[in-house]
Amino acid sequence: MLELLHIENIAVIEQADITFRPGFNALTGETGAGKSIVIDAISAILGQRAYRDSIRTGAKRAFISAVFRDVPEYPWFGENGVTVESGEVMIQREIYTDGRNVCRVNGIPVTVTSLRGLGQQLIQIHGQHDSQQLMDEANHLGMLDAFADHGALLEEYRTAFLEMDEIRRKIRSLHMDEAEKARRIETLNFQIQEITRAELKPGEDQELEEKRKLMRSGENLMTALNTAVDALYGNGEQEGAKNLISQAHYSFGAVAGLLPQAEETLKQLEELTYSVMDAAERVMDLRDSLDFSPRELEAVESRLDVIHRLRRKYGATVDDILDYCEQCRTELEQIQLSDDTIAKLQLQFREKAKRAKELAARLTESRKKAAEEMQIRLVSELRQLDMPRVRFQVQLTPLKHLEESGGDGCVFLMSANVGEELRQMNRVASGGEFARIMLAMKNVLSEKDHIPTLIFDEVDTGVSGRAAQKVAEKLSSVSRGKQVLCVTHLPQIAAMADTHFLISKGERDGRTYTSVTPLELEGRKAELARLIGGARITENTMKSAEEMLRR
């Protein structure tokens, strides 16, 4: 459960610490006091989107932290390298004016996306927009599946359906009329022949470009090599290094016998003579191996021109062109053998379709069973919420073709009054009825999950009188099994809370501040009296508030 929430620099909240307790926690206050800011802060700590515009004016960052107690050992912790001791988890999030977000769980940095995965297991937030989701019939099947709790079966079906659908797309792509087939075969044959005639070799374009670059600088290269040969071997005008070193070796050798210590130097001169001779021969071999005739350069240029024309059509490199040619051959073979290929694919399709239909049938049976149970549970819940005559039906209809969601359409029907036929819920339910149906739905679905904390953000809109009392009792009942946080304007709901917080707004030094205050008995009386009577609190409204708390 959520035990402590710390907020810094979120909108008009400069700093606030809220200690939540087990059971039913109510948050009340004037419109605009900042109740939604508290919910937004909790959403941020759960990894939901947080806008830098929410940072308090003049602050460089907003900071939110939350402490959760008795948290189970979710696989998420191991996957993200987070250690949990004694079931305590601290989540921190910093939001900067430049848009940066820094999130930590027990001191370990995590991404916002990863944090969202943990947040979905800790808290569920139900707001006014949930009723709009209930009005949209496209969401009804998902709600039934959530109640049925057959996620593994649904995932198995989806896998089978997608495999079947992939084969169906392949079959469609192979189906073409004879004229189209002939045109495509002609195009592919032309492209294959054009590439084949060029007799390309892998990497040939790179080799030719390097050779062209070398040949274009051939004159300078030959001059340099000839100069090197002359320096090593000599010519008619100058002595070469080979002769000079040989002379040094000969002259030094004539006197080496007189200088015993000169033996090492004589040996070096001899080795140097052989090294120069070897280097000179290598340079001459390299010079003789190069042929930079204009005719050969022209041939290289011509070959590169052929490759360039093919690259403009089929790929950026010779390797790409060869790959494209292979693809053309494969496609041509598929078209020429398309009848056989289609026959094989159709056989595979029938097998996959049979499997998908079997799983869809199992899914339908599971949904029918869940629909009957859901109808009973929801009617029971709604009768506790002051809808004694309500009838509710989950209507499943078979689809003409299987879809990714299965073979069923789903719509919720209801009748709130005696004598009225069952009709589509979005056509007959009032705003107050939708609020109660959504609360009943959330309560029923929460029995299937293990999320410890539920937040209801003004879900009582459109509810009043006796129905409001029933909603309050239902929220109190839910809080016996889960921690409940509820933002409300109804005194009936606030009076049922185990813990009551007042959200109030004031001004100080020209700035607006919001504070969160836990209320004791007298404070609760005063706040309930405000909810009952508005701005003018009389002795009678105070007595009414006291009576509500006593009840």
Image (spheres, rainbow, N blue to C red):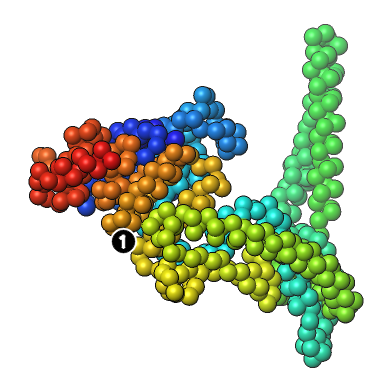
**Quadrant of the rendered image containing residue 38:** top left
The residue lying at 15 percent from left, 42 percent from top is: 542
* Total marks placed: 1
The C terminus appears in which quarter of the rendering? top left
Whether residue 214 is visible: no
* Residue 435 in view, yes or no: yes
Q: Can you identify the residue that label 1 sits on?
A: 462
Dot 1 lies on which element? loop
Residue 374, position in %: x, y?
56, 57
Identify the residue at image location x=54%, y=69%: 411
Residue 214 placement, left or right of 514: right
Judge whether 376 appears above or below 485 on screen.
below
Residue 30 point in image, percent of width and height:
20, 49
Picture coordinates of residue 166, whole percent (x, y): 74, 68
- Asked if residue 214 lies left or right of residue 147, the reply is right
Q: Is residue 471 above or below residue 66?
A: below
- Residue at 66% across / 73% down in the picture? 398
The one nearer the camera, 105 or 326, is 105
